[in-house]
Amino acid sequence: MSGISVIATSTLVLGGLYLLMAAGLTLIWSTLRVFNFGHGALLMFGAYLTWTLLNTTGLPLIVSLAGAVVAMAALGAVYEFLLVSPFIKRPNGDMLVMVATLAATMLLQSGAQLIWGPELKQLPPFGGARVDVAGSVVQGTQLVTIVLAPLLVGLLALVLRRSSIGLTVRALEQNREHAQLLGIPPRRVYLFVVMVAVGFATVAGALLGSMQFMSPAMGSDPLLRAFVVLAFGGAGSLAGTIAGAYAIGLLEAVTTYYFGLSWSPVLVFLAMIVIMLVKPEGLLHTRVRSA
Amino acid sequence: MSDLLTVENLTAGYGQAGVLRGISLRVGENEAVGLLGPNGHGKTTLLRCVSNLHRPTSGTITFAGRSTAGRSPRDLVRSGLIHVPQGSRLFPQLTVEEALRLSAASSGHAGSWRDSLDRVYSVFPRLKERRRQLTGTLSGGERQMASLGMGLMAQPTLLILDEPTLGLSPKVKHELSECIVRVRAEVSSIILVDGDMELVLDLTDRYHVVLHGDVVDSGASDDERSRDEMMSLFLGGAADERH
Amino acid sequence: MAKFGTWAGWPAYAIVLAVLPLVVTDPHGRLLLILITMYGVLALSWNLTLGFAGIFNFAQIGFFGIGAYTTGILVTRTGVEPWLALPVSGVSAVLASLVAFLPVLRLRGIYVGLATYVFSQLCIYLVLGQAGLTGGSNGIVGIPRLSLGDMSLRADGRIGYYFLGAALLFAVTLLVRVLTRSTLGRSLLAIRDNEALATSRGISRVRQHLIVFMIGAAVAGVAGSFNAFLNGVVSTDIFGFGYLTLLLSMIFLGGSGSVYGPIAGAVVVTVVSDALQDAGPWRDVVIATLILVVLWTAPKGLAGLARSAVTALRERRGRADRPPSASEPITHVKELS
């Protein structure tokens, strides 16, 4: 019995984290048609920034996180302006963006090392609430992750579906040229999208930084998992991303439980490669592209 | 009559291939101008230059007294130059009404979109029936209507229609041309490009024939004599294309 | 870079490679030269897929690591003749490339990038999982050095390793040059620039891509083996982010579309990276900034800069007696974003 509840809990926690990462990547992918390799490093930077706000201002953790989200969104705007838009229109632009965002990862990682040094850091738990589920206890950050991640991504889906900025984003991803002829300014939409995605990554970073020690490389594992989620759910579909995130969370929870920590990633990656071969457009790809 | 749009000595191309060769034309206020000519002779490139989707190599374009050089498509849309592109697949996952609202909002008329919507629905009753349908599921004719309707939502002073009847059956084409007549009453000026010469001449005041990237013939659309001459010229040009 | 296209270029290149260690005699400079040859080989081989074929191949580091591990396992566990490990490592990297190529069969563009990147990461987990064979996170230590008869390649400031690396570099440069001028090379460019057209002319994308993928992997495997002998140890660092970005910066700094660009990139990045060895994280800051500045200002890299300098020089010579052309009436239309 407890085996099942352990698996269920870690499915929801891992799935939630991957969801926050992959939703941003999907959003960037479907509107800008580029892949942000720096998303993991942005997650890490967001986590450290939350730590700094918490420890220098003495604000509550959740307020520090909110501050970090705002600051990181601003950094995201700079990021888009310097690393994405200069290359996006060039021939071979998607490869240039890939290399530029890899370079950004180097910058952010070494920057974090310079700013925050090598000592181990961790964020305190988000709240002390605890819930007893079938013999296992879910509490603090895990509980917050389980609730917050789907809530935020649901909110994003709602904004995309109902608001006028959401309408603009969807129009741009469905037909870029006609969208321009309607007077939609692509650059501003790109900026908005990257800022939102970086905000989500920051939340994921803070949650992760509260569950384990932070390090400059802490973003690379979530980034890899987010790749798998995209392969699974079909990049460009928010609905597919939501399903994919929890499916990968489940796969990882089950394989870790039965095969151990070192084999789980191998199995998850093999699953990804098999999926890519069998259904390159994503296993869960449906015609509903925009959530 | 004062000019709304003037194009002077425009040249443009893709890579090494020149498509437009010093083409000039003007569109007056309250005027409908038709562009005729076989495909591949530069009509669409001309229109893409006018709405700044394509960068010309030389020449000037003036709209409403201001040069269009260096202005974004958004800026042009907001000053009333609306381009309804050729064969757009629209926004497959948006409903008709979402697409119409989007066009009003992105052209800076978010406040009055309900009024515009009523007007568009009176011009295109069919769109009202289909308003909750995704544009990706519309028929070819309905898609063109939605495309034109989106153009109207932007409250144009100059409406550019590129091949609105492309690929439509004669019956649907007829229905659409009646819609265009109603559209004509709603806007100041129109540029109409279409493969159906009769339709273009019926719906416009003046016409230009574009061959090899330049205007080779112009005239009043209701002049029967020049109409015959132009027809033979056009057919001759089109026949050249086939061989 | 000089015009290697002329017949005099190749002997000159060989002579420069042969004379360099006589000029640079201190052990540190020698090591730097050796690293340059190794990185040059690796960057050239990666550029075959990344630059010429336009495949988003991020598995090259994986092939490099697999070559190194093959050598490590072979010479420490089986006692096979060390020299034999060089070609065998190339073969094992080719076999691995068949697996890494699977995603290329059905995926395009960025998806290939994701899948091949995951392949490299997968290598790390496999190495850690097979600790009995690979030493897990401790890596493999005590790899014997190469020797030629009684002379160790380590002798005289590792001069043996230098000449081995230089020979490899020369051979691979020649290989890349011949390859890019061959029908294979031309068909790769055709596929990269207009796949539909190339396919309609009867070029098989999968076949051509597979061939270049395997050639690139073979070279990377041999380079990995070289690396294992040079260092005497192999660890999972070899699959890591550090090598990936270092190599990418060499390729894009040098010019990803050019034959010789990556060599120039290897020289510059190796020297810069070495100069900043003690600067800690600042080294990465400098290298990352270098990559970005090149991407912003010279998207074709050093090779592109050199080429346009040569063209400009020629044009100035040709135009010297003509008046400057009249200003052309150009309508400046804002580039769409």
Image (spheres, rainbow, N blue to C red):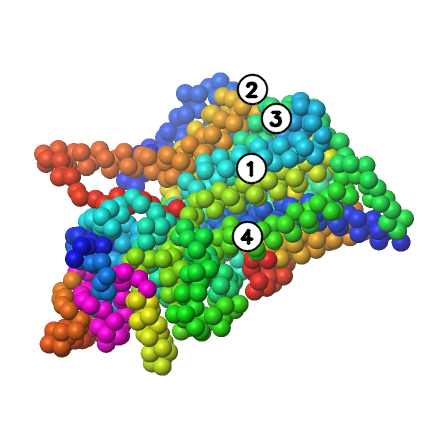
Q: Are marks 4 and 1 on the same chain?
A: yes
Identity, as a three-letter code, of the amino acid under mark 1: Ala
SS for callout 3: helix
Residue beneath disc 3:
A113
Mark 3 vs mark 1: in front = 1
Asked if the magenta segment contains residue B213, the reply would be: yes
Mark in front: 4 vs 3? 4
Instruction: Identify the residue under disc 1.
Output: A73
Distance of mark 4 from mark 2, alpha carbons? Answer: 52 Å
Q: Amino acid at mark 4?
A: Ser
Marks 3/2 same chain: no
Quick one: label 3, few (<14), some, or many (20+) residues within 10 Å?
some
Residue at the (53%, 37%) spot, across then down: A76
Q: Which mark is residue C278?
A: 2
Q: Secondary structure at mark 1?
A: helix
Is residue A276 positioned above or below C170 on the image? below
Specify which label sits upstream in the sequence, 4 or 3: 3
Tell me which chain the residue with mark 1 is part of: A
* A99 left or right, relative to C11: right
* Residues tagged by mark 4 and mark 2 found on one chain of the structure: no
Q: Which residue is mark 4?
A: A163
